[in-house]
Amino acid sequence: MKADLREALRQQLIVGDGAMGTYLYQMGFPVGISYEELNLLKPDVIMDVHRRYYEAGARLIETNTFSANREKLSKYGLEQEVEAINRAGVDLARRSVGSDAYVVGAIGSIRAGKRKNVRTAKVKDDLKQQIEVLADTPVDGLLLESFYDLEELLIALKLIRKISSLPVICQFATEGTGSTHDGIPLDEAFRRLLAAGADVVGFNCHSGPNGLMRSLERIAGMEAAPPFSIFPNAGIADYVDGRYTFAATPSYFGETARKFVDLGARIIGGCCGTTPEHIAAIASSLRGYVPDPAAIRKLTENVREPRPERIAEPVQVSDRPPAAPPVQSEPTIVDLVKERPTVIVELDPPRDLDIEKFMQGASALKKAGADALTMADNSLAVTRMSNLALGSLVQERIGIRPLIHIACRDRNMIGTQSHMMGLHALGIDHVLAVTGDPAKFGDLPGSSSVYDLTSFEIIRMIKQLNEGVSFSGKPLKKKANFIVGAAFNPNVKYLDKAVRRLERKIESGADYIMTQPVYNAELIEKISEATRHLNVPIFLGIMPLASGGNAEYLHNEVPGIQLSDEVRQRMSGLKGEEGRAMGVQIAKELLDVALSHFKGIYLMTPFLAYEMTVELTKYVWQKAGRRDFHLYPLEK
């Protein structure tokens, strides 16, 4: 029988396996699926990958369970399959390799460096569920990998130590710096992990051998150094001819493996981009290798950085969704709607390069008294001019507050944070976070939908910027002051379920709500009753119909919009000026009901026909009593 993993590490070097996800990608499985679900759908494929790494020389095999927690699996509707996927992952690994291999249950970070994108209580619950399942299987140990923050890694480790004495390997993802993402020096972080019960500490992912070497060099001489584990990426990923590739060769991995051993590493494998060939090179290089006792001194004498006398405190982020930022030089729409009726008007950016009519509409709406001009983010997945650019123009030239929609569809997390930082630089601080319609149903069906973030996550991440913390958890030197809205579709069969979803958005940090257009007076009253308990303002959506054809299109083809039979009948056959006049009349009747229940009104302009929403904006002020409530004079 093989020795216990702890005992083995005192006697020998152990070669770890390589990447699972990127190797499956190289085998033809696409990005954007749950690779962990393949434990159930394609067990032979997963066993084949394990077997290839074992035959290459790996004797520490990770289960295919890295993202098999409730939070990550929920993205694919698999949150109920946590136990099945984890148990299958262990079983497949066990059956794929010889009895001389150690099988460790892989557990990945839930926050993945995004700090407070998931609340601590949920992190604990989801980690606990996965840990309990894996600890109840025949694994030789547990591997906590790709953690960025000490805080989350300690949560996982302490949960394990409450229920199990299994050997535990703890690994940070690092950029080659000397500290964790939450600001803890690596040597201090490792000491705290060892004190909490870790058996092995180390690094994986995010960096290739060079980056992980720099991090290991900084802490290799720490007192009572533990066994280190190292699983670098195969360099930096490149995107060539529609495929992701990695530059680091197997021979390079073989060369660097010995340097890692000289620095105290006792488990060496590979992460993203590595293949069985990389692992074979490591195994060949380390076969019979005896580390040089003087190597640590030789390798670190020129790279150890003096420890500062006073370590900067890690960035602290509240576990609760941040409150709306304090009122600046002028009141926000949230402040306004608490005191008086408030009107937001949507004006779609043009689909061409001519902005003349758009700017005319913005000016007319400002004169009519609109409190904010909101611009969609390529609504219905149809390409339009950048709402950021137009938002800046109307703010500067027209003097009306822009409210910018941010869709999850078009930008990954990098692009989304960059976009938000640009808005902050321009002084645009009101946004609406939306999922966005799928790209394949728009005017460029060959384009991709990104959806890195859900609507809940994007709200949390934007509010994190208000604490001066980036999506990755790094300090931003300044705090943003975004007022973040969330979308609400009340045109559903079960309104109570929609309200519960809305409550989750408010829990994520939404400051206000904007609804899809409503065309039924009775539904307006139901919405008022169903949302009475909510503590954020709701801007009820009203969009005047332009024609009978427009009414039928919206009712039958546009998601989230449903017209009453009465409205469809009144609009039937109407077009041109007659159709627009009836559309405005119906909208006024709906406003009569809405204003008795909601102070917030959200008007949507069809086809850039801004004359319609100008008239409706003026109607709101006439109903409210302009002299008492409104800041802007009506156009004479």
Image (tube, rainbow, N blue to C red):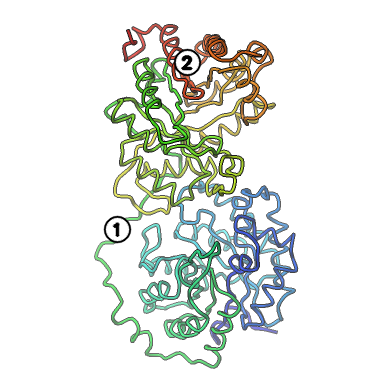
Q: Is residue 178 left or right of residue 512?
A: left
Amino acid type, callout 2: Met
Amino acid type, callout 1: Ala
Q: Residue at x 37, y 79 (%)?
A: 221
User: Residue 343: x, y in percent?
Assistant: 43, 19
User: Residue 30: x, y in percent?
Assistant: 63, 59
- Indicate whether 35 appears above or below 381: below
- Residue beneath disc 2: 612
Residue in the foreground of this view, choosing between 53 and 291: 53
User: Residue 68: x, y in percent?
Assistant: 63, 57
- Indicate whether 324 appears above or below 422: above
Q: Residue at x 37, y 15 (%)?
A: 368
Find the distance from the CA under tag 2 to the CA under tag 1: 57 Å
Identify the element where label 1 is drawn: loop
Res 424 → quadrant: top left
Residue in the foreground of this view, choosing between 607 and 293: 607
Res 586 → quadrant: top right
For the C terminus, the quadrant is top left
Q: Residue at x 70, y 66 (%)?
A: 137
